[in-house]
Amino acid sequence: MGTTTSCCVSASPKLRRNAHSRLESYRPDADLSREDTGCNLQHISDRENIDDLNMEFNPSDHPRASTIFLSKSQTDVREKRKSLFINHHPPGQIARKYSSCSTIFLDDSTVSQPNLKYTIKCVALAIYYHIKNRDPDGRMLLDIFDENLHPLSKSEVPPDYDKHNPEQKQIYRFVRTLFSAAQLTAECAIVTLVYLERLLTYAEIDICPANWKRIVLGAILLASKVWDDQAVWNVDYCQILKDITVEDMNELERQFLELLQFNINVPSSVYAKYYFDLRSLAEANNLSFPLEPLSRERAHKLEAISRLCEDKYKDLRRCSRKRSASADNLSLPRWSPAIIS
């Protein structure tokens, strides 16, 4: 310890810079080409720009990018309207409820507390349009999602299992069974759809009759663990789907995460966009949320909630006013975006 030389001195950045300055300057050989010297290598910043550009068109990551399921559903909606116009068949009378001076009709679904039953119906309809309007040329089919290679039941898979598109009711029953048995929330259904579209975009695959069940199962499995505080374990899903093994569930979860590049973050803006696009999908397909007259009890409850929120924002504005204060005790309110993850 009494010596002046130590390991800290030898590792000093200053000494390393001095040692580097004593090195002779590099002189490239005249016979070497640009390929040999690496001058044609792409700079890392150029590659990052490409990734950022693709990110803007990914609806599961960027709030301004249009959701895939809504664009796929609009094709069928336009065809239905065109058929009704050509055949001169007016659309059926839909029993709509309108608010008046004496009665106000509201549905019980909000962006923070969606209606569970109708949210699952909308998610099942979005998955149905994904399958129906998939790429006709066909894209890569991964083995982990192939139901023939990894069946969910012991019953024999029919030879034409990949030929017939499932009906919207079949998809709804499958999703509803998982949500009811695992007691999942409506918010989890929206996050499930976000993960599903993120998987299709990142892995560049299509959801089809051969893989839709396992893709939906993997998305629900991951969404339940991310969203719910008391997540359902993989072994619990084996009790819901009697013939599936824990090893298969673990492998499904692992590969799903790898295909997502471990990006399980769902910004609040993306979540809100998917919620309102699901409402637009329901409106376009006459799948409206149930309206109920505003009762006196519920009106008082809404008024109390609004008054509580108003008082909360008043307190925030009061705290954010500029006041003279000592620099030692200076504290300003910090605003951070809400992240659902």
Image (tube, helix red, strand yellow):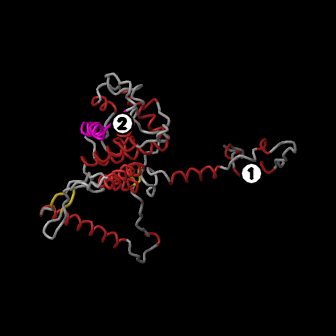
Q: Secondary structure at mark 1?
A: helix
- Looking at the picture, how far across and down is residue 104, in whole percent? 17, 65
Front label number (1 vs 2): 2
- Looking at the picture, how far across and down is residue 168, in whole percent? 30, 41
Q: CA distance from mark 1 to mark 2?
A: 67 Å
* Residue 175 lies within the magenta run: yes
Which amino acid type is shown beneath numbered disc 2? Answer: Asn
Q: Secondary structure at mark 2?
A: loop
Is 148 located above or below residue 334 in the figure? above
Horizontal arrangement in the rendering, residue 270 relative to residue 170 (left or right): right
Residue carrying label 2: 165
Which quarter of the rendered picture does the N terminus lie within? top right
Horizontal arrangement in the rendering, residue 297 relative to residue 61 (left or right): left
Horizontal arrangement in the rendering, residue 138 relative to residue 25 (left or right): left
Foreground of the two, 214 or 161: 161
Which amino acid type is shown beneath numbered disc 1? Answer: Arg
Q: Residues within 10 Å of mark 2 (few under 14, many from 20)?
A: some
Question: Which quadrant holds residue 133?
Answer: top left
Question: Which quadrant holds residue 303?
Answer: bottom left
* Residue 68 lies within the magenta run: no
Is 291 located above or below residue 322 in the figure? above
Q: Main secondary structure of the magenta part?
A: helix
Residue carrying label 1: 17
Is 85 located above or below residue 195 in the figure? below
